Amino acid sequence: MFKAIIADDEEWTRKSLRKQADWEGIGISVVGEAKNGAVAMELVEQWKPDIVITDIRMPVMDGMKLMEWLNDRYPQVLVIVISGYSEFEYAKKALSLHAFDYILKPIESGPLADTLERAAAKLSRDLDDKRQAALLNRKVHESAVLSKEKFLMNLVLGALPGDKEIRSGMARYGLPNDWARMAVLVVAAENFDAIAERSYRKDKELTGFVLANIIGELVQDRMNAILFRNYGNPNELIAILELTTLDDQAGMDMIYSGCRQIIDTAEQATPFKFRIGVGREFTSLRDASRSYGQASEAVRNAGFMGVDDDSIIHIDEISSRNDYMMYPGDKEKELIYYVENAYKTQALQAIEDLFRDIGSSRTVHPQSIRESVLGLVIGMNKALNRYGMNLETLLQETSVVDNLMSGLPSAETLKSRLGVMVSSSIDFLAENKKTGTRKQIGDIVSFLQEHYREEISLSGIADRWFLNPAYLSRMFKNEIGIPFNEYVTKLRMDAAAKLLQDPQLKMSDISEMIGYANEKYFLKKFKEFYDCTPTEHRNRSKKNIP
């Protein structure tokens, strides 16, 4: 909606102007009325209108004086002159002051509406032209910035051929090429993905732009540095920092002090949680790539250091950790065993123990932690594969490993993610086994009923059905109500009781027929089961025969 002011010393004229056109429909809002040029000037200063409609002859200050003032102070304002005088000199003077139109009194609604519509159309065109010009300027600026940042990325990636190309590029973009000592910093936000999702509709490019603006101002205020974005990774800002002291310790103190101020200020004003990785110093820009690689490694591994403050990490703190801890094979098997057998409490405790050991060490290299976790993920996938499942499908993720290691994970976030995987795997396996187990136990019961005369053992049956013996024992009792061995004994004792009804069969024959090679063992088991000997049982049966 464009803004307009009406200046006329006659009130009825001002009211008539308001009534004779559909101002709102044309897209114009009358924000003020003035009875002379002086009052109109005050309203212009207050409202900054797009259109001024003015009479020529007014007390205190006439319309021509007002137009001269507008032409000098606000040349973009469209002036529409209304007058009862048709003399050529008035029209000529108005046109020389760049009046948009000249309307004679008495004012008719048709010409007024036509003039207002043309004025609104011109203002819209002018506004579009300004927007296009601003967009073009922004694109030109962005293109220049992108070109400079592309050059700087090639510099820190070691993709420039030699010193000549480096010097030429630095000069082309007006960058300093005479710093004696430098170091590369890499700045990233630990919670970048979460903030992008929560605050910027998952737009990582926009989140990265916000991040760059915040850090850019703070770095320029506190450090002598060249700061630029990594366009391949919106959650990464890179700074080539000048070290102004020859003393190594003083240089490190300067870096840490500046980084601490930047992080503290940024985290107070934003929800971002920052990390800064620091590479080793260098004296020639051709070595910037080495320092950049070190700073990247430092920021990527900061969360595994187990220190109170992991927000600023120098590469030397990473490289000093030389122990490569692989998760012990027996511990890994133990965890997978817990997963397979749905022991959730024990499995989660095993993860807790692993990360407690990691946190208490000051010598374990972060890469070994990643490899240990990767081994556990592979083990869980193997357990799930037996049931036609994998972690990607179960968790509805494209790549569990990539998601596990993406961003800037810390030991705590890795523990949490691994815990989710373990819990989800156990829940799936428990539910799958609950339905699948009933069929398996049913098949096993049918097998036992047909083969109880043969040598039977829990481990043998477990092997036959590719089950863990302890798991089979637990599931069998849950489904059947009695332990596995008791069920086999019951089958044999029931069969023995029937066979004892045949007086021709000897005890040794019956023992062998029901699966006991040792007659004495059979007699012992029968006595335990029926609380009488086989002979006593046979005699009782005879008495009960009519």
Image (tube, helix red, strand yellow):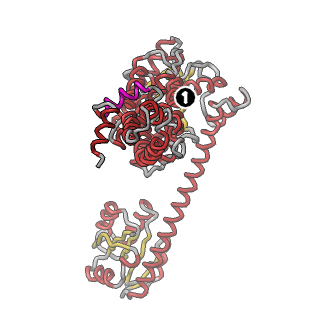
**28 or 369, which is in the foreground?**
369
**Vertical placement of residue 55 versus 176, above or below:** below
**210 or 124, which is in the foreground?**
210
**Vertical placement of residue 253 versus 480, above or below:** above
Secondary structure under the numbered disc 1 in the rendered image: helix
Badge 1: residue crowd in 10 Å (few <14, some 14–19, many ≥20): many
**Vertical placement of residue 137 versus 56, above or below:** above
How far across and down, in percent of the image, does residue 284 sit?
Answer: 64, 21
* Count of all numbered marks drawn on residues in the image: 1
Q: Residue at x 51, y 19 (%)?
A: 325
Q: Residue at x 44, y 22 (%)?
A: 305
In the image: residue 169, left or right of residue 66: right
How far across and down, in percent of the image, does residue 390 sit?
Answer: 52, 43
How far across and down, in percent of the image, does residue 44 sit?
Answer: 34, 64
Q: Residue at x 37, y 66 (%)?
A: 49
Instruction: Note whether residue 407 is visible.
Output: no
Magenta span: predominant SS is helix
Answer whether residue 461 is magenta in the image: no
- Looking at the rendering, in which quadrant would you find the N terminus? bottom left
Looking at the rendering, which quadrant does residue 359 occupy?
A: top left
How far across and down, in percent of the image, does residue 215 sit?
Answer: 45, 36
Circle 1 residue: 296
Q: Residue at x 30, y 79 (%)?
A: 14
The range drawn in magenta is: 519-529
Name the amino acid type tagged 1: Ser
Q: Residue farthest to the left?
A: 11
Instruction: Note whether residue 125 is visible.
Output: yes
**388 or 80, which is in the foreground?**
388
